[in-house]
Image (cartoon, rainbow, N blue to C red):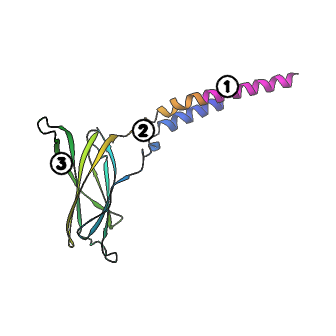
Amino acid sequence: MRGACAFTAALILVAASTTLRAHSGPPFPIVTDAIRGPYMISIWTDPDATDDGSPGGQFWIVLGLTPKEARIPHDTRITVAVRAITGRTPRDNRPMRGSAITAVAAPVHDDTGNQFAALRMDHEGPYEVRVDIDGPLGRAAIDSRVDATYDLRPPPYMLAWYLMPFLLVGFLWTRLLLRRRTLVRKR
């Protein structure tokens, strides 16, 4: 009985742990190998909407150059801007746009060809994404769209709720086996 209580307590501690919060899914590409000027641009994103003010909209910009032997200069600057598309105007049915949120991307592990930016996307829905590149090789810009969603993972305490039927069946099965064993010994 003490073992079952210890197991239950350990399970509750693990379920309440904040270190178990895993990523809801891998980033996905919204632009793949688009050539703008001397740059070959790919944009990967994980567009999570947040209510707590944290920058949940994550963007990875992968740059290459059309002459494959060249390298991206270190003073190349990438700016990512997102703008919410809030609805449709009644007259011409064009999408209405909110104000733009911008961030300057930073190199990942000092690799100028792989840069990361995080922005706050405060609600679900479609967003326009614009990536501007400015560097010694010239300027380039690319536009795309993405749909931001809230993270669909259940809260960590729900792990215990989801596991409860399996634990109950396991407990009852173990109890039945132990009872059957004591009946066999008594005979």
Front disc: 1 or 2: 2
Q: Is residue 159 above or below residue 36?
A: above
- Which residue is depicted at the point 38% across and 52% down? 28
Q: Is residue 167 left or right of residue 103?
A: right
| Left or right: 83, with 12 as reference point | left
Classify residue 181 as left or right of residue 119: right
Region of the chain picked out in magenta, as a range: 167-187
The location of residue 66, given as percent across then percent down, is 30, 72
Alpha carbons under labels 3 and 1: distance apart: 58 Å
What amino acid is at disc 3? Ala
Of 165 and 30, the residue lying toward us: 30
Front residue of this view, candidates 95 and 46: 95
- Which element type, helix, strand or loop, lies under badge 2? loop
- Residue type at mark 2? Arg
Judging by the rendered image, the residue that carries numbered circle 3 is 100
What secondary structure is marked by label 3?
strand
Dot 1: element: helix
The answer to which of marks 3 and 1 sits earlier in the sequence is 3
Task: Give the mark nearer the N terminus: 2 vs 3.
Answer: 3
Q: Which quarter of the rendered picture does the C terminus lie within? A: top right
Q: Residue furthest bottom?
A: 69
Which residue is label 1 attached to? Answer: 172
Hey, which quadrant is residue 61 in on the image? bottom left
Report the disc number at residue 153: 2
Residue at horizontal 25%, vertical 40%? 122
Amino acid type assigned to the residue bearing label 1 in the image: Leu
Can residue 65 be found in the magenta stretch?
Answer: no
Mark 3 residue crowding within 10 angstroms, few (<14) / some (14–19) / many (20+): some
The picture quadrant where one finds residue 6 is top right
